[in-house]
Image (cartoon, grey):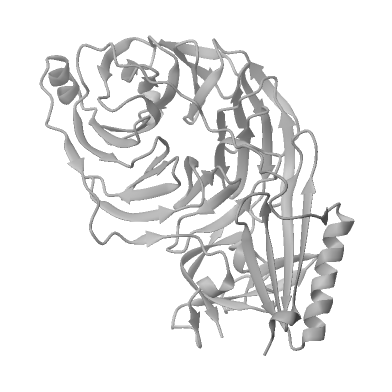
């Protein structure tokens, strides 16, 4: 049994000037147990715990970990003396709408904090707010579950049926299973403004106007600094990564091969959307502009009455929607003719998505709003007839899920249930990789797996794995440690 005298802790920090790395690394040895805690300075960080056969081996392993970090520039420090760097939170104003009529809102769910993140799929509506809460609802507004993340949610993105939340703590969380986990840990000098994900490759735009590209194993691929700062738009497909910033939209080759085109926009880009052949940039100069993905040429302009905070389209770009800084929402035809302008009734729309004649908005007052965007409903609203808004309430026993920060937070099992998949953590090339050991899988492919619970030699049971483009698997279902 270990005693207090056997416990030793080494605390290191790496803090670079000019917005570089700003992170800590702490190693504690308690008898045969080594606990590593790491993350951004000022944050709680992630925790990994490993038990060794003897206390001597535990001390040796801890010394190796400390030595590796010192060689990378970390130095001994006193916890709490160095302040955390401030995170940029989007400052937005919202004026009352000048529209003469209010949108036909079917239901509204108030999350309690300004909301930027939204995703709507066949089954669910997702909303993420600045308090770090992510809620899932069905299409009629019933709240199904809540995810409690460590920091404010900047945006929600989907890659097939995987859902990811980019947060102010610099991490991107996979919310596809009951146990959310940090699938990507963005570099300490990247202040996330927006992100997109395409076939496991994460594209991050930031305050400095950079574009950073990271693969499914959280390894840096390439980065570029665009012509302007404050990059609030990034969208990706097979052809390019489209980066919107203060000076317009720049398209880059997906492999980092260079700039494909750059188009100045009418005002700084505040939001972006994409369809198959076009990208849409909402700007501070009160317009949405449609740009050709192939050439960057401006194909159409959609004029609003205030700076555009968000935009979206119906499939194929038949209708174009926009939300402005004055709590109004607009609809245009493909060529730019304004069809209607209505008040949201819930502040300015910071993000939006159209699906099946409904327009879903997340707003400055923290609401997820479902608008009936059918022609009949909008026509009635313009005449002053709108439905009574149904305010959605939280269920008394709402399931709540938080990310695991240590191995002990994961349920343990003594055998794999029938049909489950077993994976193993292995040391490879200086990193801990996760490989499939169950029959029927390609064991050479890696698994996108929580960093916080990777431990060499440990085995885990997951409900299912799905192969993804790029040669890796994604986890579906619960994660349990195999004894």
Left or right of 20? Residue 443 is: left
Please name the residue shown 50% across and 49% down the image. 164
Left or right of 368: which side holds 44?
A: right
Q: Quadrant of residue 27?
A: bottom right
Q: Residue at x 24, y 31 (%)?
A: 371
Q: Can residue 158 be seen?
A: yes
Q: How many marks?
A: 0
Q: Residue at x 66, y 43 (%)?
A: 84
Q: Residue at x 33, y 56 (%)?
A: 145
Left or right of 172, for residue 146 = left
Horizontally, is 29 left or right of 89 in the view? right
233 relative to 475, above or below: above
Quadrant hosting residue 429:
bottom right
Of all residues, the one furthest to the right in this rendering is 71
Q: Quadrant of the N terminus?
A: bottom right
Residue 315: which quarter of the image? top left
Q: Quadrant of the C terminus?
A: bottom right
Tell me: residue 47, above or below residue 159.
below
Tell me residue 312's x, y (percent): 40, 27
Is residue 279 something that shows in the picture? no
Give x and y (percent) for residue 216: 63, 53
Q: What is the x, y in percent for residue 17?
A: 80, 36
Residue closer to the observer: 304 or 256: 304
- Picture layout, residue 481 above or below residue 153: below
As drawn, which residue projects farthest toward the bottom? 1
Residue 330 percent coordinates (x, y) = 32, 18
């Amino acid at each position: 049994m270990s005693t207090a005298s056997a416990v030793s802790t080494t605390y290191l920090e790496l803090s670079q000037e000019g917005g570089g790395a700003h992170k800590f690394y702490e190693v504690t040895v308690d008898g045969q147990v080594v606990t590593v805690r790491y993350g951004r300075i000022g944050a709680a960080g992630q925790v990994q715990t490993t038990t060794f056969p003897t206390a001597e081996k535990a001390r040796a392993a801890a010394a190796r970990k400390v030595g590796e970090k010192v060689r990378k520039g970390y130095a001994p420090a006193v916890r709490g003396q160095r302040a955390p760097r401030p995170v940029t939170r989007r400052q937005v104003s919202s004026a009352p709408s000048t529209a003469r009529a209010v949108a036909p809102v079917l239901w509204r769910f108030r999350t309690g904090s300004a909301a930027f993140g939204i995703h709507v799929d066949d089954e669910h509506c997702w909303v993420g707010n600045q308090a770090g809460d992510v809620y899932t609802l069905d299409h009629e507004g019933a709240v199904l579950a809540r995810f409690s993340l460590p920091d404010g949610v900047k945006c929600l993105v989907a890659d097939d049926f995987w859902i990811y939340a980019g947060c102010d703590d610099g991490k991107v969380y996979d919310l596809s299973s009951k146990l959310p986990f940090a699938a990507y840990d963005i570099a300490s000098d990247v202040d996330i403004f927006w992100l997109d994900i395409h076939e496991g490759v994460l594209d991050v735009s930031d305050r400095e106007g950079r574009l950073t590209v990271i693969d499914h194993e959280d390894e840096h691929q390439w980065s570029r600094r665009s012509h302007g700062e404050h990059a609030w738009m990034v969208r990706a497909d097979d052809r390019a990564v489209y980066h919107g910033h203060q000076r317009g939209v720049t398209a880059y080759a997906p492999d980092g091969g260079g700039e494909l085109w750059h188009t100045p926009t009418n005002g700084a880009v505040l939001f972006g959307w994409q369809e198959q052949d076009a990208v849409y940039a909402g700007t501070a100069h009160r317009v949405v502009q449609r740009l050709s993905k192939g050439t960057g040429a401006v194909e159409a302009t959609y004029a609003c009455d205030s700076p555009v905070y968000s935009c979206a389209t119906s499939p194929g770009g038949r209708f174009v929607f926009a939300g402005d800084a004055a709590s109004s929402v607009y609809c245009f035809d493909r060529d730019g003719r304004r069809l209607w302008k209505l008040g949201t009734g819930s502040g300015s729309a910071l993000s939006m998505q159209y699906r099946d004649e409904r327009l879903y908005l997340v707003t400055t007052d923290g609401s997820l709003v479902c608008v009936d965007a059918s022609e009949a409903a909008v026509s009635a609203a313009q005449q002053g007839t709108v439905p009574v808004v149904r305010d959605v309430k939280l269920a008394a026993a709402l399931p709540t899920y938080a990310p695991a920060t240590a191995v002990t937070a994961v349920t343990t099992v003594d055998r794999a249930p029938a049909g489950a998949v077993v994976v193993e953590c292995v040391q490879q090339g200086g990193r801990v990789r996760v490989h499939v050991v169950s029959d029927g899988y390609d064991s050479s492919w890696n698994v996108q797996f929580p960093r916080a619970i990777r431990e060499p030699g440990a085995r885990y049971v997951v409900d299912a794995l799905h192969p993804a483009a790029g040669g890796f698997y994604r986890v579906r279902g619960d994660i349990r440690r195999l004894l």
